Image: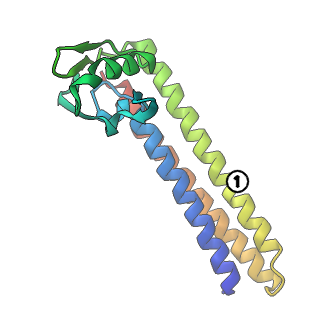
Amino acid sequence: MNEEITFILDAAKESMDAAIAHLEKEFVKIRAGKASPAMLSNVKVDYYGSQTPLSQVANVSTPDARTLSVQPWEKGMLHEIEKAIMNANLGFNPMNNGDMVIINVPPLTEERRRDLVKQAKAAAEHAKVSIRTARQDANKEIRSTDDASEDLKKNAEGDVQELTDTFTKRIDTFLDKKEVEIMKV
């Protein structure tokens, strides 16, 4: 196969892998009933005037399936961390015991579970759009190659479609697993 076409196929695969990796990160943020430190990954704390990720000013852990504990590295940050968690609008009510911030993760209601499934489906659809965009870009590049025969170009476009189908199936599989995880009581 033509070296340029091989490069285009590799770039398309890399782009599709990135879409899957992004989807996995998005799915980690969608809570499915049990506590996870990733739930607080988007929380930014006002740390001496700059917005800093919570993970850089405190240790976040899960002592049990329904509790998150946030142990700040500086005791003076307790109030700021508590405020940041409240402002993040995650539906959590943090409690400060003077030593650490403790968050009890409430069980999900049926309605909230359905909302989370919708959120997961939206993230999966976004990933599929990214994959289709990668396919479109790869096909454009293949068609614009000058030193390849028409048959080679058609075969390469077929390979790009196979990649697209494979990655779309992976997204559907991830979505099905996440949906089961979310709906499990």
* Left or right of residue 121: residue 161: right
Residue found 66% across the figure and 63% down from its top = 161
Q: Position of residue 24 (x, y in %)?
A: 44, 45
Where is 119 relative to 92, above or below? below
Residue found 67% across the figure and 73% down from its top = 8
* Left or right of residue 20: residue 32: left
Q: Quadrant of the C terminus?
A: top left
Q: Position of residue 127 (x, y in %)?
A: 58, 45
Residue at the far front: name it: 48
According to the picture, the residue beneath numbered tag 1 turns out to be 133
Residue found 17% across the figure and 16% down from its top = 98
Viewer-closest of 7 and 180: 7
* Left or right of residue 111: residue 56: left
Viewer-closest of 76 and 105: 76
Q: Quadrant of residue 71?
A: top left
Where is 10 relative to 79, above or below? below
Q: Residues within 10 Å of mark 1 (few under 14, many from 20)?
A: some
Where is 40 relative to 22, above or below? above
